[in-house]
Amino acid sequence: MRSYGFLFVATCMATIVVSVGAVLRFAVGMSAVEASLIALVLLFALMTLEVSVARSRDRAEVSDRLEGLARASSDIAREVGELRHRMAMQEAAPVPESKAASEPLAREIGELAELIEEIAQSVAVHDALLSAPRPEKAAASTATAGAAEKTGYAPSAPGAPLAGKSEDEIKTLVRDAIAAGRVDLYLQPVVTLPQRKVRYYEALSRMRLKDGAIVDAAQFLGPARAAGLLPRIDERLVHNCVQVVRRLAAKNRDVGLFLNIAPETLADRAVFPEILGYLDANRALAPSLMLEMSQNVYRSLGANEQESLALLAERGFRFSLDRIEDFRIDPRGLADHGVRFIKVPAELMLKRVQDGGAHIHPADLADLLGRYGIDLVADHIESETIVVDLLDFDVRYGQGFLFAPPRPVRADVLRGERVAEPGLTGAVAAGVVESSAAAPGEIAGSAAAATAAPAATAASTAGRPGDLGSVIRRA
């Protein structure tokens, strides 16, 4: 608007000057030079007047604004003074009145704490009664564990599918199962704590006999190792895990998979190049596949096995250590070699706290590993009391029968691309994994813990990203 007003004033001044000059020239009879000089003087006078008026107007406007700011400043100062006065009065208020107002809440909180403590004690007693093994079963399990430690595998318990069979007969059954494609893939979830949201799965092998009986890995891996069949089993396991990860990735699920790999497979110069080529062709899935081995196996790796692990690490694959037996751990060295997960039995962590004198205190283990990019997973969790104790150790992930037992992968997940996949030997390319029920002996091993788990656990692990429903068949 000011620009239009300036143009209007300039036009008026020009009109007045021209009119005065014309009157002086033609009406008064002055010469053109004299009339022009007088007109110019008049124009200068008008311009000076206009500038003076504009400055006066600007000064008045600035003065009005300054007055408004002064009033606003005084209002703000007054409000700040009132707030200070109120705060002073609040601070000077009698303390007994505040205590009187909070005492009822404090009493209620104390009563709630006592009730929670009583409930926790009742749950602990209930879990102890459910999980306590019978004397004869405890003796049998002790003998089985001792035999497994000496021979590398656990002998079959009475009534098990392989009970009464010799090691040679078991080797023959394993060869037949591999040739017929009856080494099945089972998945057990690894959940976040305390939310219990499924974040990873561990891939487990189960052998299915001709009569449909399911044999746990502990019953046949020892004879399979003695017969040199572990590389073929691992090759099949790698292929099936890639199929599962592809299925989950197609559904936009941020889920990873742990799969065990034997040192014999890493050292096998016939099978390992096939596995390496297949994994190299699926390098995009590397962030979702974690190759796993026990702590003792990792410590005893030779030069050939370490070279194989280095080749896998170069392709982006990460590693995990499970069956931790002691806390003599070098996080920096493990991180440098690509280890990103460590699975520690929950009972071991709690036992080391009670015993004391550990190389690394369990309460500091998660923080120490996290500094080097290694996540801690507590496995073999079979009761709610263990979960409560582990939360004090800042454990982010948990695994065990409390959350879910291993369940078989659905057949349609592994069916379709088996023949078209390159770089696989005949043992892996043959057959299609059939779905089957979970191993009865496996579930029975922790039936008490699975029964004691509340319904909220099942609800929390279902319907989440990476839910078992789309990949495995419900047992």
Image (cartoon, rainbow, N blue to C red):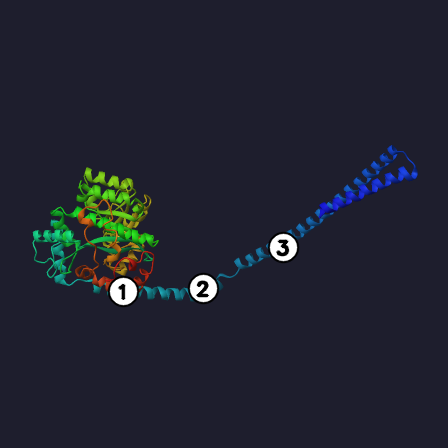
Q: Which structural element holds mark 2?
A: helix
Decide which of 386, 372 is in the foreground and name it.
372
Q: Which quarter of the figure is the C terminus placed in?
A: bottom left
Q: Which structural element holds mark 3?
A: helix
Q: Name the residue under label 2.
A: 102
> Is tag 1's residue or tag 3's residue first in the polypeptide sequence?
3
Q: Which amino acid does label 2 sit on?
A: Ser
Q: Where is residue 9 in the image (x, y as percent from the top left)?
A: 77, 44
CB under 8 Å between callouts 3 and 2? no
The CA span between labels 1 and 3 is: 61 Å
User: Residue lying furthest front in this view?
Assistant: 420
Please tell me how crowded label 3 is: few (under 14), some (14-19), or many (20+) other residues with Cα within 10 Å: few
Q: Where is residue 260 in the image (x, y as percent from the top left)?
A: 22, 49
Mark sitting on residue 78 = 3
Decide which of 196, 270 is in the foreground and name it.
270
> Is tag 1's residue or tag 2's residue first in the polypeptide sequence?
2
Q: Which amino acid does label 1 sit on?
A: Val
The CA span between labels 1 and 2 is: 32 Å
Q: Which structural element holds mark 1?
A: helix
Q: In which quarter of the image is residue 59?
A: top right
- Is residue 311 visible in the rendered structure shown here? yes
Mark sitting on residue 235 = none
In this rendering, the label closer to the viewer, 1 or 2: 1
Q: What residue type is labelled 3?
A: Arg
User: Residue lying furthest top in this view?
Assistant: 33
Q: Name the residue under label 1.
A: 123
Q: Where is residue 45 in the image (x, y as percent from the top left)?
A: 82, 39
The residue at 72%/46% (across/down) is 2
